[in-house]
């Protein structure tokens, strides 16, 4: 009977802590990809990819823990579907950054343009806003404006990433050279642009939570 009572009690800290862990992993993987796109040799790229891959495994583990906790907790701080969608979309960011690093290793491009560094920095910027927003979830009912402001910052950062990627494509095709290199670079930077998109998607899910419960 006591076990059943404990199961039915709110477990808010658990979910907030797990989402914080996921946010911290996104920060770490964003830092790694900044270094990865700056490398000039394959061995260094491989080193960063392995570090990023390890972080991806940690994110998957946290995602699985959240899924299990949702199945085993009767009362959650907000809708379990929203918690699951939020954590899954955060995990998407990690997966896309990992995909970018993997492509750098597999394709071994002759050079990586400065646009990739700019995009990686913007992804890191969005990750910082995202972590701050997730950390506000424990008190979002008292001060929803803080999360709204952070989500707006994520959206602005994503728009900047779109502009950087668009100008990169224009320059890439205007100065077309080696067709294979063009394909490589387009694919690598596209994953970074998609990571910024995923960060914006997290922001949208956070705003959904606010609308429902704040």
Image (cartoon, rainbow, N blue to C red):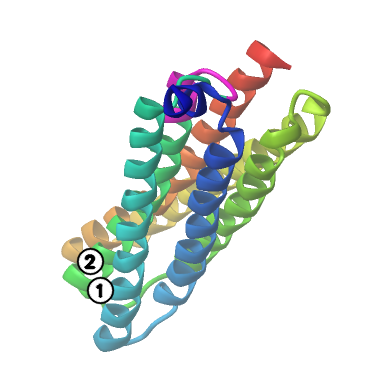
Image location (x, y in percent) of residue 51? 34, 74
Q: Residue furthest front?
A: 1
Residue 80 in sight from this viewpoint: yes
Residue at which label 2 appears: 181
Image location (x, y in percent) of residue 142? 82, 26
Residue 121, above or below 135: below
Residue 189 in sight from this viewpoint: no
Is 142 placed left or right of 58 in the picture? right
- Magenta stretch: helix, strand or loop mostly: helix
Image location (x, y in percent) of residue 89? 42, 36
Task: Check if mark 1's residue and mark 2's residue have beta carbons within 8 Å.
Answer: yes
- Residue 81 covered by magenta stretch: yes
Which element is circle 2 on?
helix
Between 153 and 26, the one lying in front of the other is 26
Q: In the figure, residue 140 lies in which quadrant?
A: top right
Residue name at image x 56 percent, y 32 percent: 11
Residue name at image x 26 percent, y 87 percent: 43
Q: In the figure, residue 113 lies in which quadrant?
A: bottom left
CA separation in Å, label 1 and label 2: 7 Å
Indicate which disc residue 109 carries. 1
Residue 94, above or below 214: below
Point out the stretch of residues depicted in magenta.
77-84
Q: Earlier in the sequence, mark 1 or mark 2?
A: 1
Between 184 and 173, the one lying in front of the other is 184
Residue name at image x 76 percent, y 23 percent: 141
The N terminus lies in which quarter of the figure? top left
Q: Nearer the viewer, mark 1 or mark 2?
A: 1
């Amino acid at each position: 009977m006591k076990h059943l009572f404990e199961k039915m009690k709110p477990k808010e800290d658990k979910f907030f802590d797990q989402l914080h862990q996921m946010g911290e992993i996104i920060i770490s993987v964003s830092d790694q990809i900044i270094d990865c796109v700056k490398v000039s040799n394959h061995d260094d790229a491989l080193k960063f990819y392995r570090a990023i891959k390890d972080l991806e495994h940690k994110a998957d583990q946290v995602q699985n823990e959240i899924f299990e906790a949702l199945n085993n907790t009767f009362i959650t701080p907000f809708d379990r579907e929203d918690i699951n969608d939020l954590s899954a979309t955060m995990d998407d960011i990690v997966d896309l950054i990992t995909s970018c690093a993997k492509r750098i290793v597999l394709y071994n491009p002759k050079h990586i343009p400065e646009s990739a560094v700019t995009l990686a920095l913007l992804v890191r910027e969005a990750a910082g806003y995202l972590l701050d927003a997730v950390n506000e979830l424990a008190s979002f009912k008292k001060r929803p404006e803080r999360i709204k402001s952070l989500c707006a910052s994520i959206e602005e950062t994503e728009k900047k990433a779109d502009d950087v990627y668009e100008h990169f494509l224009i320059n890439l095709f205007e100065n077309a050279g080696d067709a294979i290199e063009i394909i490589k670079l387009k694919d690598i930077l596209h994953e970074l642009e998609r990571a910024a998109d995923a960060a914006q998607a997290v922001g949208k899910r956070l705003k959904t939570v606010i609308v429902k419960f704040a």
